[in-house]
Image (cartoon, rainbow, N blue to C red):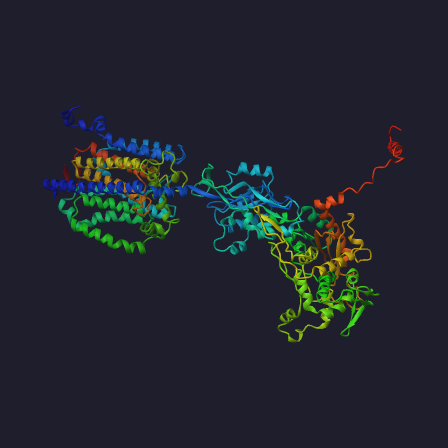
């Protein structure tokens, strides 16, 4: 086969077809490019704003800036809770970061042992991606600068300066103010679905107890935001300061407490366990609310080790328990003030005498008076002064539980007060109706047995109160007019909270209250149960009070009667008091858990706390410091010689002196 | 030099004459595009020649030399090497199937010593040459409609299937469309074209559902509804469109594109370089670049008109079609009008392999131009 198989016409035909088709290719390309141009025009000319917005939200990120937490101060402005700078080390988890290796590297700059590294690794891996986790708090300046210098090479590591809560008085206010600590999952759940995103901020601390918890939102303030430029991995690229939203600092909270009184109270408790509450009898302000032993709230801020926590939680004297609010005690003989009021209110003549021979028989049981030999013939005043149980046993049968309960409740026992902080226990002020309710399932136990009146009258039995209630009771007695309410928080953010004196009048005759007060004055006079322990040594400023020794259990026959032996079976010592007697200003209630005696354990402590309180009151001070009246000037014959001889003697006494 | 001088026998074979015959305006357009590429690569590296801009510029320099050298190669040599190059390409694809490196989950690379390359690039030139060679010796009647069509169909199908199996869907598609373009340009009957288009359209949905890898299917589905997964697969398209749209008319300014500078734009130096340019230079910059691409396409297409040989025509047009497809696939992807496939913007994107392929292709186009009056002889006779 020779010769061409494609002829010249075909060549032309092929060329023609190609040229036509090539025009189509050109048209296709032209169409495509035009479509691209159109699309570009649409995106870049008509949708610019939308995409600019998206681009900006990509580029800029608002990072939360926590607000400085509100400061807590005492009634004179002394700082009880403040903030100090804290150098922190933060690590974030991100794509391509080897957290384990990072932690190993960091361990060469800051102390991070193996155990802690493992715990942190778990924390970091369970945290959301790009959410920084605090690896170390409170670095020294050297550690901070060492890490800062190397931070660029260590991906995901930042060192920054935050703020940390500090409690300058350590333990004295730990129960009232509480503490802040790391946010845990429960806090976020409790805050509901719209939880403040600041809760997720690393190192953010939330109030866990006391005032810190109750006023957490006020103290928190409003977090601000830093407008920062970030890259696609969320890393901060630059920060110019424009567009930042400044944080709103938390509100300052002023308490009614007084630093000196509170500190003195913790001091006088020493090793003992218990609570003390001091109230202003005119305003209801709580000047002191101390629970001992206490703990250092600062350690909770940093995070307690398991061992430390276990130590605090299992210690027999329960440092974590607020003994003023959460501890319930039988008030013992301090309650005789209430029984006395009930007796007077029942119209019984206070001068009726009861003979005390060391106890009385009732219902086949012998009820002891605390004085074995008996007090002899006692009227109401004597009975308060000597704390004679027999008198009150006898009278209780005439008064009955309901009248006693009315008095106790009117004076504030068995109540919870709105002092702003949680954790108060209500206690029990029993009466017939209460017993019926309490034994709703056990009908045989429901009636009020007359024998129960006897223990009720001396503050035992079902009766249980807390230390704050005792202070309120005493303050109301001392005030004599109004059913004062306690106030712990004076102002929040400069706004004053209602005073405790805006209260209804007491539903008891003034002369009856005065009678009881006189009885309490007698307690601290010579011969009274607390005579020695309650001498303030402030001249004519005297303290009136009532001792109480509350038994914790039924004494065995011939047993130690709660005056020794195992600590937790010993009697509680209580003392309530007010001063000055002539113009009552302050009321105090002290409970010394298992302190054995009201006059021995509680009264001397109450005296010390009361002294401090009185000496801080300028009016009282003025009274004490008031110069005694001078005699009319009369020439003293010895005036010229005496000073001279004194001077010579003193000079001679100094060794190496001119003589 | 006068026209009469050029008609002297042998005159056109002189090197100096050949050099003047190169379309230097076309080369200038390529230089401008590559220059824009280097400019952008400098910007997105944070105003730094490393790691991309300097390499891009120097590679392009080498590629221009290669282009000129290839333009000097006689078209008859290209003609003679057409089948061997195609054959080599297919063999390399088979080799990569057997011993290739796996990178980014696909078997695309072949290493010889320390030098590694993608055989799919060889076949891009090979398919154009082989089909042009084939149709050079085929009558218009045969090219239009005949049982004989299975030969070019097979020639296209073998490399396409091999590349698709790597899997590199973007390149497979590109090879298939390039081959298809040459078959159409050679004069395929419209009936068959219509049938084939209908067939492809009918096959796409089942293929998407059953034949694709998960990530491929995800890309397609995301393309259809980018909002469905804004942080996952839709992220690339969305970020690219943000870069484009926020550029506005004049752009954010050179070196000031937040999308690219802060790494919101994925693959910013390769597949999404156009979006980076759009962000910093706006609509004006984009339109200028598109005009440059249009100019390159039409100049290359014009070369195919000038050729006196059918081989030259089809080869030049085939390269032009490949180039056009590159530009369109990448451009439409960046603008959110096509699914994300790994096809770069030729000359603009960083990456030596594609640049080399395209410049070799343009070397062939310039060779067609320089030798447009050459006689190319097929095995069965000589034609002009």
Q: Toward the viewer: A150 or B300? A: A150
Q: Is residue A395 left or right of residue A45?
A: right
Q: Is residue B208 left or right of residue A436?
A: left
Q: Position of residue B246 (x, y in %)?
A: 35, 40
Considering only vertical position in the picture, is B331 above or below A305? above
Q: Residue A270, can we see it?
A: no
Considering only vertical position in the picture, is A360 above or below A527? below
Q: Quadrant of residue A575?
A: bottom right
Q: Position of residue B133 (x, y in %)?
A: 20, 41
Q: Position of residue A61 (x, y in %)?
A: 44, 43
Considering only vertical position in the picture, is B167 above or below A329? above
Q: Is residue A598 left or right of residue A658?
A: left
Q: Position of residue A191 (x, y in %)?
A: 51, 54
Q: Toward the viewer: B197 or A577? A: A577
Q: Quadrant of residue A630?
A: top right
Residue farthest toward the bottom in the current orientation of the protein:
A444
Q: Is residue A647 left or right of residue A291?
A: right
Q: Quadrant of residue B317?
A: top left
How many numbered badges does the structure rendering display? 0
Residue farthest toward the left in the current orientation of the protein:
A9
Q: Toward the viewer: A76 or A32? A: A76
**Image quadrant in which the C terminus of chain A is located:** top right
Q: Residue B328, can we see it?
A: yes
Q: Residue at x 24, y 53 (%)?
A: B201
Residue farthest toward the top in the current orientation of the protein:
B1
Q: Toward the viewer: B285 or A574? A: A574
**Image quadrant in which the N terminus of chain A is located:** top left
């Amino acid at each position: 086969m020779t010769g061409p198989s494609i002829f010249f016409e075909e060549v032309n035909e092929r060329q023609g077809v190609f040229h036509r088709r090539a025009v189509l290719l050109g048209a296709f390309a032209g169409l495509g490019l035009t479509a691209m141009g159109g699309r570009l025009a649409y995106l870049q000319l008509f949708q610019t704003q939308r995409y600019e917005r998206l681009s900006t939200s990509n580029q800029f990120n608002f990072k939360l800036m926590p607000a400085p937490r509100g400061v807590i101060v005492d009634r004179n402005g002394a700082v009880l809770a403040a903030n100090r700078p804290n150098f922190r080390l933060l690590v974030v988890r991100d794509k391509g970061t080897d957290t384990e290796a990072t932690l190993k590297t960091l361990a060469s700059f800051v102390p991070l042992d193996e155990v802690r590294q493992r715990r942190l690794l778990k924390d970091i891996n369970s945290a959301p991606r790009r959410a920084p986790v605090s690896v170390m708090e409170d670095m020294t300046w050297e550690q901070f600068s060492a890490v800062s210098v190397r931070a660029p090479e260590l991906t995901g590591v930042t060192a920054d300066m935050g703020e940390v809560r500090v409690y300058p008085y350590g333990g004295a206010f730990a129960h009232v103010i509480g503490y802040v600590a790391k946010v845990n999952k429960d806090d976020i759940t409790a805050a509901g679905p719209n939880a403040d995103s600041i809760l997720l901020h690393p190192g953010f601390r939330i109030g866990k107890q006391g005032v810190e918890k109750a006023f957490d939102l006020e103290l928190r303030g409003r977090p601000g935001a830093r407008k920062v430029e970030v890259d696609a991995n969320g890393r901060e690229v630059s920060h110019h300061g424009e567009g930042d939203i400044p944080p709103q600092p938390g509100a300052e909270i002023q308490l009614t407490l007084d630093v000196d009184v509170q500190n003195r109270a913790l001091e006088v408790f020493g090793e003992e366990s218990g609570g003390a509450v001091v109230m202003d009898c005119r305003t209801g302000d709580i000047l002191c609310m101390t629970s001992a032993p206490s703990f250092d709230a600062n350690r909770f801020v940093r995070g307690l080790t398991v061992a430390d926590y276990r130590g605090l939680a299992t210690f027999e004297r329960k440092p974590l328990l607020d003994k003023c609010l959460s501890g319930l005690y039988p008030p013992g003989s301090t309650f005789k003030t209430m029984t006395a009021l009930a007796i007077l209110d029942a119209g019984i003549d206070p001068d009726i005498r009861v003979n005390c021979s060391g106890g009385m028989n009732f219902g086949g049981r012998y009820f002891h008076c605390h004085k074995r030999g008996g007090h002899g013939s006692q009227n109401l005043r004597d009975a308060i002064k000597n704390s004679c149980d027999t008198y009150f046993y006898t009278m209780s049968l005439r008064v009955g539980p309901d009248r006693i309960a009315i008095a106790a409740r009117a004076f504030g026992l068995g109540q919870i007060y709105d002092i702003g902080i949680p954790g108060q226990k209500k206690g029990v002020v029993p009466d017939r109706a209460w017993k019926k309710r309490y034994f709703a399932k056990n009908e045989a136990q429901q009636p009020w047995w007359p024998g129960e009146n006897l223990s009720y009258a001396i503050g035992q039995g079902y009766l249980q109160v807390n230390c704050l209630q005792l202070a309120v009771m005493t303050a109301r007695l001392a005030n004599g007019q109004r059913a004062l309410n306690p106030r712990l928080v004076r102002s929040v953010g400069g706004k004053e909270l209602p005073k405790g004196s805006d209260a209804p009048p007491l539903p008891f005759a003034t002369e009856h209250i005065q009678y009881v007060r006189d009885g309490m004055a007698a307690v601290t006079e010579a011969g009274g149960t607390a005579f020695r322990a309650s001498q303030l040594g402030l001249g004519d400023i005297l303290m009136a009070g009532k001792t109480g020794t509350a038994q914790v259990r039924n004494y065995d026959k011939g047993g130690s009667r709660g005056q020794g032996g195992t600590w937790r079976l010993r009697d509680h010592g209580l003392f309530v008091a007010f001063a000055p007697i002539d113009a009552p200003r302050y009321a105090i209630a002290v409970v010394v858990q298992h302190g054995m005696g009201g006059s021995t354990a509680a009264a001397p402590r109450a005296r010390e706390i009361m002294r401090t309180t009185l000496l801080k009151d300028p009016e009282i001070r003025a009274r004490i410091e008031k110069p005694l009246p001078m005699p009319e000037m009369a020439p003293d014959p010895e005036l010229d010689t005496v000073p001279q001889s004194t001077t010579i003697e003193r000079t001679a006494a100094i060794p190496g002196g001119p003589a | 030099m006068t026209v009469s001088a050029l008609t002297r026998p042998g005159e056109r074979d002189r090197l100096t004459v050949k050099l003047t015959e190169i379309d230097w305006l076309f080369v200038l357009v390529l230089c401008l595009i590559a220059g824009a590429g280097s400019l952008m690569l400098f910007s997105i590296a944070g105003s730094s020649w490393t790691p991309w801009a300097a390499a891009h510029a120097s590679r392009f320099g080498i590629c221009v030399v290669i282009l000129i050298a290839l333009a000097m190669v006689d078209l008859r040599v290209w003609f003679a090497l057409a089948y061997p190059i195609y054959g080599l390409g297919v063999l390399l694809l088979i080799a990569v199937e057997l011993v290739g490196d796996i990178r980014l989950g696909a078997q695309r690379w072949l290493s010889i010593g320390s030098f590694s390359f993608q055989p799919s690039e060889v076949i891009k030139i090979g398919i154009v040459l082989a089909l042009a060679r084939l149709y050079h010796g085929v009558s218009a009647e045969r090219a239009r409609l005949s049982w004989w069509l299975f030969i070019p169909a097979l020639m296209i199908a073998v490399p396409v299937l091999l590349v698709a199996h790597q899997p590199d869907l973007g390149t497979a598609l590109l090879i298939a469309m390039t081959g298809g373009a040459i078959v159409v340009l050679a004069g395929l009957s419209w009936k068959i074209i219509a049938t084939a288009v209908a067939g492809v359209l009918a096959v796409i949905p089942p293929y998407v559902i059953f034949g694709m890898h998960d990530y491929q299917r995800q890309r397609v589905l995301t393309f259809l509804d980018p909002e469905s997964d804004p942080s996952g697969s839709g992220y690339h398209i969305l970020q690219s469109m943000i870069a484009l749209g926020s550029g506005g008319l004049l752009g954010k300014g050179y070196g000031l594109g937040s999308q690219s500078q802060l790494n919101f734009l994925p693959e910013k130096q390769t597949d999404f370089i156009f979006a980076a340019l759009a962000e910093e230079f706006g609509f004006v910059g984009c339109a200028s670049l598109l005009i440059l691409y249009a100019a390159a396409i039409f100049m290359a297409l014009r070369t195919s008109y000038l050729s006196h040989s059918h081989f030259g025509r089809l080869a030049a047009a085939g390269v032009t079609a490949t180039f056009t497809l590159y530009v369109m696939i990448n451009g439409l992807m960046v603008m959110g009008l096509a699914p994300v496939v790994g096809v770069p913007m030729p000359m603009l994107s960083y990456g030596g392999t594609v640049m080399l392929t395209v410049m070799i292709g343009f070397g062939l186009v310039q060779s067609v131009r320089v030798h447009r009056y050459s006689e190319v002889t097929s095995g069965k006779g000589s034609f002009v």
